Image: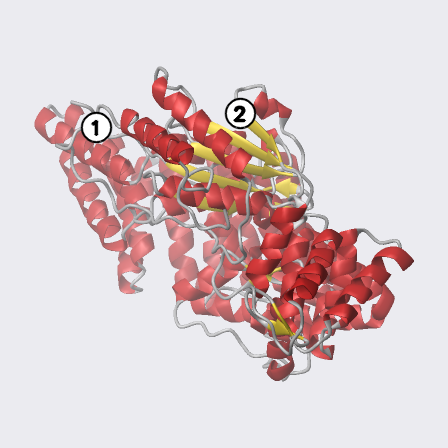
């Protein structure tokens, strides 16, 4: 089998065909009970797997074992949990390639496939599972505009959404079973393909199929090389059964076999060696073999290291320098623009370096379009190359360029999302050494911040380590919007703590107030009440001392009020919101006045001061309409509805709820629509209008099904 087959086992043998039929039997079995009369589901997500760039060879025993397991499940009683397959082995052994191949083959049997690399969501060794759940739900429910913020609510929605969805879910770079327990789908008709360097005995003890991968055999390794080089000629030699210049084809095959042995059956080493051959068709085969053998025997390096050393030695200067700098980039993957910033010598060198590393097999395509990523083994090798061929100054200069470039792009993205947001830092001017990322809309800017989140949060830490205090806290400012939208509390806490400390060292008083406020919200959202209390108190005290009566003072009071409301002290919270509003009135900031008025009204309602709350919320609604702030308008009207309900004004409450629903439908906020329909069902039920109550309950159910929050009802 040389890759590309659609049956488990890979060969079009009678055994494989029978096995494929057994798997089809399993997929037919799990569909029993489907009702074609049910309403059409929400827009379905599309299968998303990495492109299979490299030749795939063998792994027939493992693929057949998975096929047998699926066939056995189809013959047995209805399974109670998804099939989990754990592919384990050292880096470069081909775990990811096999997992992706299996997922592609499961697509042929009707499963919906998706790939998640946990390294993309890992910071300092820890997985941000809240962010991963949001990522999965964003794929599973593409029409949903808003997801819950709290982890428990996300887990509940994920379980509901995966209860009746047949998934082939690839989870790559898993370190432990605990990391993925909450990510396992509920549907017993799903298959989870886990790639891990370690055996995950905790999963295997619960019925997972464990498959430990070994290096490819010599024959299969040789076949991988033959597929890569094809019929291309090298130094007068041609592979694939052809000859050039009268050379014996047996000699070229022998040289190829020598390289296959040097790669020791590691697919990643074979792919790198094959690309080295293709990149240098005029180089004598004897020279390539000699170089690889010399590195192996004289330097005592592992066989894989020998291949990569030879590939590095063949790089042009821009590619070699980029290779030495790449492991210091803190992101999951990298774009051409960011690579150009890392090099700092212009877009031409950036393109040459990017293409050179890709062609040499030292950079791979990322699952995300337009990006490249470096394998963990190659990242470690690049560090060693930097130690042998680079110098510390080269690395530090590259990191400083990268830091400034990312800060500029983050600031530009933040302004594209919200031009009037309060900011302290002076924006970075245009940079001569790397191009700007184009942001055609706020949505594109938000998508860029999310795609680069790992790099951005990592660069805050790097800035602190380099003593670049101004850059550290300045970069935290545009990260605020990403944090608000995605709720990655632990990453935010680490970054905002660094920002706070750097602002303090930098003597930037206003920035320090802002950093304390940002940090405080991340702290209380993570349940760290005492730490949040300290930060908000200190922010207010500093503002009263340094910038009394100015916008940072108003902001500090607002955050202190939000914290007190979260802690269950609405009376004290109202006092802080009112003080903040007074400052906004004095300095002439209409939106600040609107926001604080809404917060006062909402908090008064929660405190039971309903008449006062009504007056404040009516004022907030009026100002929101005048300022064309649709989101605040809808929120103010919803709070008014709740106030009317608490005052016993059922007709006014229903009218306000309906008005709020109209605003949320216009905004496309399904989550808020569901909450309002639920409340309307309660209000109308209490008033004796059971028909209206059932209508609202039914609509709320429809929206939950549409968003994957619960299964479709059965007849």
Q: Is residue 318 above or below residue 7?
A: below
Residue 374, by quadrant, is bottom right
Which SS class for mark 1?
Answer: loop
In depth, the one of 370 and 7 nearer the eye is: 7
Relative placement, left or right, of 297 versus 361 is right
In depth, the one of 198 and 595 nearer the eye is: 198
> Is the C-beta separation of discs 1 and 2 under 8 Å?
no
- Relative image position of residue 462 (x, y in whole percent): 73, 60
The quarter of the picture where the C terminus appears is top left
At 60% from the left and 81% from the top, the residue drawn is 347
- Relative image position of residue 47 (x, y in whole percent): 37, 48
The disc placed on residue 517 is none
Q: Is residue 546 visible?
A: no
At 8% from the left and 27% from the top, the residue drawn is 691
The residue tagged 1 is 34
- Relative image position of residue 204 (x, y in whole percent): 58, 23
Relative placement, left or right, of 56 versus 530 is left
At 41% from the left and 58% from the top, the residue drawn is 593
At 11% from the left and 31% from the top, the residue drawn is 692
- Relative image position of residue 517 (x, y in whole percent): 59, 51
In depth, the one of 7 and 480 nearer the eye is: 7
Counting residues from the start of the chain, the first of labels 1 and 2 encountered is 1
Label 1 and label 2: CA atoms lie apart by 27 Å
Relative placement, left or right, of 590 versus 680 is right
The residue tagged 2 is 208
């Amino acid at each position: 089998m040389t890759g590309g087959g659609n049956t488990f086992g890979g060969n079009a043998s009678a055994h494989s065909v029978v096995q494929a039929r057994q798997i089809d039997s399993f997929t037919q079995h799990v569909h029993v009970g489907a009702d074609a009369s049910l309403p059409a589901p929400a827009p379905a997500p599309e299968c998303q797997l990495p492109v299979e760039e490299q030749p795939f060879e063998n792994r027939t025993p493992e693929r057949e074992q998975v096929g047998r397991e699926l066939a056995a499940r189809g013959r047995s009683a209805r399974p109670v949990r998804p099939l989990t397959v754990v592919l384990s082995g050292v880096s470069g052994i081909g775990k990811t390639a096999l997992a992706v191949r299996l997922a592609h083959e499961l697509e042929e049997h009707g499963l919906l496939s998706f790939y998640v690399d946990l390294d993309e969501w890992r910071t300092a060794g820890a997985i941000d599972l809240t962010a991963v759940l949001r990522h999965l739900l964003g794929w599973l429910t593409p029409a949903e505009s808003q997801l819950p913020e709290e982890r428990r609510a996300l887990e509940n929605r994920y379980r509901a959404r995966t209860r009746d969805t047949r998934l082939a879910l690839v989870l790559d770079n898993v370190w432990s079973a605990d990391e993925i327990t909450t990510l396992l789908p509920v549907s017993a008709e799903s298959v989870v393909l886990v790639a891990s360097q370690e055996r995950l005995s905790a999963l295997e003890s619960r019925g997972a199929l464990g498959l430990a991968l070994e290096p490819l055999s010599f024959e299969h390794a040789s076949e991988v090389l033959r597929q890569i080089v094809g019929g291309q000629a090298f130094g007068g030699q041609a592979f694939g059964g052809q000859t050039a210049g009268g050379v014996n084809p047996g000699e070229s095959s022998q040289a190829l076999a020598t390289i296959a042995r040097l790669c020791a059956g590691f697919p990643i080493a074979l792919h790198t060696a094959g690309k080295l051959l293709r990149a240098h068709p005029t180089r004598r085969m004897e020279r390539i073999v000699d170089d690889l053998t010399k590195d192996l025997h004289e330097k005592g390096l592992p066989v894989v290291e020998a291949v990569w050393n030879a590939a590095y030695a063949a790089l042009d200067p821009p590619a070699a320098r980029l290779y030495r700098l790449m492991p210091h980039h803190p992101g999951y993957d990298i774009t051409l623009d960011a690579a150009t910033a890392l090099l700092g010598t212009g877009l031409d060198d950036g393109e040459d370096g990017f293409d050179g590393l890709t062609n040499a097999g030292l950079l791979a395509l990322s699952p995300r379009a337009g990006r490249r990523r470096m394998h963990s083994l190659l990242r470690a090798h690049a560090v060693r190359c930097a130690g042998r061929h680079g110098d510390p100054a080269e690395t530090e200069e590259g990191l400083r360029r990268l830091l400034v470039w990312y800060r500029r792009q983050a600031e530009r993205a933040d302004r594209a999302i919200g031009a009037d947001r309060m900011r302290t830092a002076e924006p970075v001017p245009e940079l001569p050494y790397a191009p700007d990322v184009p942001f055609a809309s706020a949505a594109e800017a938000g998508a860029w911040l999310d795609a680069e989140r790992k790099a951005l949060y990592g660069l805050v830490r790097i800035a602190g380590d380099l003593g670049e205090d101004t850059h550290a806290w300045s970069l935290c400012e545009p990260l605020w919007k990403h944090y608000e939208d995605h709720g990655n509390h632990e990453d935010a806490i680490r970054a905002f703590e660094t920002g706070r400390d750097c602002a303090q060292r930098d003597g930037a008083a206003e920035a320090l107030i802002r950093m304390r406020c940002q940090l405080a919200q991340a702290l209380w959202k993570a349940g760290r009440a005492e730490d949040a209390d300290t930060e908000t108190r200190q922010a207010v005290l500093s503002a009263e001392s340094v910038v009394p009566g100015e916008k940072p003072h108003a902001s500090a009071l607002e955050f202190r009020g939000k914290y007190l409301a979260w802690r269950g002290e609405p009376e004290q919270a109202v006092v802080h919101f009112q003080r903040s509003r007074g400052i906004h009135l004095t300095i002439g900031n209409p939106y600040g006045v609107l926001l604080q008025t809404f917060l006062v009204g909402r908090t008064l309602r929660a405190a039971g001061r309903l008449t006062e709350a009504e007056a404040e919320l009516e004022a907030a609604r009026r100002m929101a309409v005048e300022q064309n702030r649709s989101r605040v308008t809808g929120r103010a009207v919803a709070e008014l509805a709740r106030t009317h309900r608490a005052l016993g004004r059922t007709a006014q409450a229903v009218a306000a709820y309906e008005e709020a629903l109209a605003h949320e439908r216009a905004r496309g906020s399904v989550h808020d629509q569901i909450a309002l329909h639920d409340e309307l069902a309660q209000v109308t039920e209490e008033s004796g209008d059971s028909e209206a109550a059932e209508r609202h309950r039914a609509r709320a159910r429809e929206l939950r099904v549409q968003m994957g929050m619960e299964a479709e009802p059965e007849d």
